[in-house]
Every structure is written in C-alpha cells, then in structure tokens.
Image: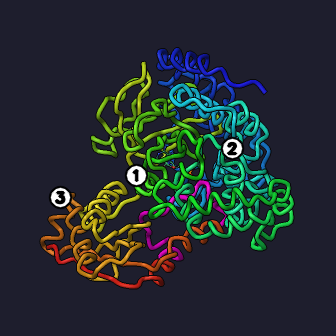
Amino acid sequence: MELLDVDKLIEEFESMTKDAGNVQRQTLKKILEENGCAEYLQNLGLNGRTDPESFKACVPLVTHNDLQPYIQRIVDGSSSPILTGKPITTISLSSGTTQGKPKFVPFNDELMETTLQIYRTSYAFRTREFPIENGKALQLIYSSKQSKTKGGLIAGTATTNVFRNSQFKNTMKAMQSQCCSPDEVIFGHDFHQSLYCHLLCGLIFREEIQFISSTFSHSIVHAFRTFEQVWEELCADIREGVLTSRITFPSVRSAMAKLLKPNPELADLIHKKCLGLNNWYGLIPELFPNVKYIYGIMTGSMEPYLKKLRHYARDLPLISADYGSSEGWIGANVNPNVPPELATYVVLPDIGYFEFIPLKENVEEAKPVGLSEVKVGEEYEVIITSFAGLYRYRLGDVVKVTGFHNLSPELKFICRRNLMLTINIDKNTEKDLQLAVEAASKLNTEEKLEVLDFSSHVDLSTNPGHYVIFWEISGEVREEVLEECCNCLDRSFVDAGYVSSRKINAIGPLELRVVQRGTFQKILNHYVGLGAALSQFKTPRCVGSTSNEVLQILCNNVVKSYFSTAF
Ligand code: AMP
C-alpha cells in the first residue's frame, strides 16, 4: 500500500482554494448535470441551466422536513430518480441527538468520496506538523448495525456507512492510521464490549500507537473514564492471556484471542503506571509512550469535554477533526497546531455548493450569499447543496467567518441554530449555556467540583416558566457551593431579554438539578438503543418536551435541586 503524497495533497488544496469562486460554479454545474434528470429538480423548471443565478431563482431553501416525503419514497424502495440521477442505495441515519429523533438522509458513492477527500486533506496538514511513523492508531470507533429498509435499502448511521466501506480501510492504511482493533470489535453488536476490547487492543499495541482518535471527542473521554473503572480487569486479562467473561460475542472473543497472549510483564507495567498517577492526570502518554496527538471533533458541543481530555492527555496536542454532517462535509482543519478552542475549518469548494444566510439581518428577509461573498467577523447559517440529493438544504448550524484561506472562507463552528432556551423574549443558545456552565463550574476550584456532563430544559409547568439545568458532577461538593453555582448560572445568561424578564419575574428563578452519577450514561444507552452509533453521539444540551424519554431519565435521577436567588 502506497502512502499518501502529503505535499501533492497540500498543493492541490492550495490551488483549489485560490480559485474557490470558480471551483464552486463548476461544482454546482457538475451536481446539476449529474442529477438534472431527478424528479425534484425537473419540477423546479431549471431546464438544464446550471449557473448559480438560475439555481437560486428556481430552487427553494429547504429543511429536512420539506424533503422528508421524497426521502421516504426512496426509503420505501422507489427506484425512479427522485433526488439524484443515479438511484440511492444506502441511507444514513443522522445521530438524532441534536433533534431528538434520527433523520434519514441519502448516502452514495460521491458522499463517500468526499468523506475520504476531507480525511486526506486534513491528514496532509496534520502530518506536516506532527509526523507519524508507520504504526497503529487507537481509534475509538463503533459501528451500529446496518439494517434494510422496507424498500430494501441499506440503512446505518453515516459513520457506520463510512467504516463499512472497503475504501475506508485502504485510506486509513495509506494514512498510516490503521485501527489497532480487529473489525469484529469495531463492528461489535454491543458498544460496552467493543469499548473494552478497544482499550485492551490499545494496551497490547501500546508502543505502536501513534495517535488516539474518535469521530467526536466525547468517545475518547468516555473511553478513558471507563478505563478508570476497568483497568484492573484489563491488566488481569493481559496477565493471563484470557479475555474477561464479560465479552460474550463469540466472533469478538475469537478475534481477540488471536491477539491476547499471557504477558505478566506488560500487566505489571500498566498496573504500576496506573497506581503512580495522581487522579489519572497524564494517563494517555503514560499508557501510550509514542502517541503524537489526540484527534477528534472537539468544537461545538464537544468543547465541554476538553478540560477532561487535557487532564488525560497532559501536554499532548489536541487536534480537532473536520467539520461535516451526515448530510455532507463542509470544511477541513488545516491548522492543526491551533488549540481546539480556536479551531476553524476551511471550506472545500469542490465537495458541495455552499451558501450562507447572514444572521445579522432580519432572518425572514436575509438573502443567502455565496462562498466568496461572506464577510469576516459575521455569523451565518450554512446551506448545503450536495452530490447526494440535497439542494439548498438548511443544515441548522451557525458558523462565524474568521478569515479566508486563499479565497475560501475559514469557519468557526458556533452552535446549532435551533437549540435554544427561550420562554418569552429571551434567547439563549447552546453556546450561551456552555459559557454559563463553564463560569459556574469554575466557581470553586478547591472543592474539586467537576461537571461530568450537563443538559437543560425549559420548564413551563411552573408559572412563570423557568430554566432548568441538569448537572452530573463528581467530587464532594458542599451545599453552599452548589447554591452559589446555581446563582452563577442564572447570572451568566446575559442576554438582555433574559435579564430583563428575570428582573420582573416574567421568568422564574433558574433551577439547578443535580443528577445521580451514571445518568448521562443512561441517556447514551437510550440513544444507542434507538439505533444511534456511539461514534456520533452528542449529549442533547437542551431537552424539549418532545424528547420525553430523555427528560424522564433526567428527572427520575435528580438527587438534589436548587433555585437561584440571584435576582
Ligand atoms: P450528525 O447528525 O451526527 O451527522 O452530526 C452533524 C452535526 O454535528 C453538525 O451539523 C454539527 O452540528 C455537528 N458537528 C459536526 N462537525 C463538527 C465540528 N467540527 N465542530 C462542531 N460541531 C460539529
């Protein structure tokens, strides 16, 4: 297997972004030529035109809901060209953790190719800064089951569809990023068992591991939190060369048996290293002496896990992975030495046609602008036109343009647009919530207060309604401290609508509900039970009353609640 030519990849990227405007026009032309015969486009009267002006004049902006009837016909097995020229044979289930239930979106070879293209692009830039040797990677990746839809299409989460594609493995090899775990582990039917085996494989190949990765960095934090619970069991397995009886799937057991040999020296070494750590600080470099960096999406709803990740990683670089969605990819992280809090993503102008709705103006009237027309410092909602049958599709993400790489914009992920705490005139986004939680959890560092995870809810059953913040915490924290945290949360929502409503009691005092340890694990299990993959899991930061079961899990596990006295 030939390794990728990093210089060539960078050169190609540079020349493409220098001509971003033209490349966008060409990309739109290609998408419309390939799919012009699809019923959806036929009905819009483009009549073969492929220029951006006609496209914008004929094709409406849509949400997933608008496309649902078309997608449903595809799912049900209609083989006529509905959204794409070539029939869709695979469906992705989006993670569903941002909106409560998984959505179906089309997946095809072109989407697969753009996925690999973005992987290769950021790999090239990463490798230039942080070269890796030809070793292995501890990739904490999981693949949910692929099923068949009523109409006979293959359906799985987007990551599952990618991991199961034969090209994925080849590209990983060419990127010196081969997963140290066997396929049976990645594709195991129980993610707890897969996670345990990933950790075990990592330890067996500890000297060869070059980096640790996952799709979203939550999975890395989750894995090492689990390691804290199971490390002695892992050591015992290595000592005896026999896999714990907890792993029950025969295919996983036999794949692991091929790797696991009695190795008391290694078991002793790991045991000693674990005992020598203070509160698991620096666990990753201790276990994996040749790791060069940690890699996974770390921005947006993953930011709250950075503190814990740094704790485990000590001084290892944390590199945020690229920006995309089940619907399509958007941008690559080409500045890997920037800390994740400042990570930006350069739009790849040939992987889709992109438009941006300015958020400064009145939303109803705001006209989307093209990739070359965005302004630095402004926020936009992203609109995707993809090679997989989505045309002018509102992704629902808010990004800020921080600059340009050649002529292609660099985007900072801000938040999901529809995740919002609102009761009357107040508007608080996921980002506002994250900042409030950050401020409150920093209040009293001597207390060793650690917010393991959090979510929120608007409680309208009280009059007036009020915000509820759920916290799962570790450490012994005094009542007075939590009362102060609750006040701090309330004060940290600085949105003028919120503050003024609070002052006149049009919004009631914020409530902090502390939930039992393990509550967020139950939520994760709930989503995995629904068919979501752990790889794409994002803790729902705002639970609406439509996500009834998740709200029930949270409410059933409350151990203590506090009301703010800040106003
Ligand atoms: P999924 O529904 O699993 O396809 O997740 C896609 C969503 O994850 C995107 O619409 C974003 O909201 C979020 N996301 C993906 N990549 C990033 C990133 N690099 N930074 C922040 N959020 C991201």
Residue type highlighted by circle 2: Phe
Q: Which residue position is annotated with label 3? A: 496
Q: Earlier in the sequence, mark 2 or mark 3?
A: 2
Q: Earlier in the sequence, mark 3 or mark 1?
A: 1
Q: Does the closest atom of ligand 1 sit within 8 Å of the Cβ of label 1? A: no
Q: Which residue position is annotated with label 1? A: 417
Which element carries disc 1, helix, strand or loop?
Answer: loop
Could you tell me which quadrant the N terminus lies in?
A: top right
Classify 423 as above or below 288.
below
Q: Which residue position is annotated with label 2? A: 107
Q: Position of residue 374 (x, y in %)?
A: 36, 29
Classify 237 as above or below 107.
below
Q: Which segment did they paint magenta?
A: 530-551
Residue 88 colored in magenta in the image: no
Q: Earlier in the sequence, mark 1 or mark 2?
A: 2
Q: Is residue 515 left or right of residue 366?
A: right
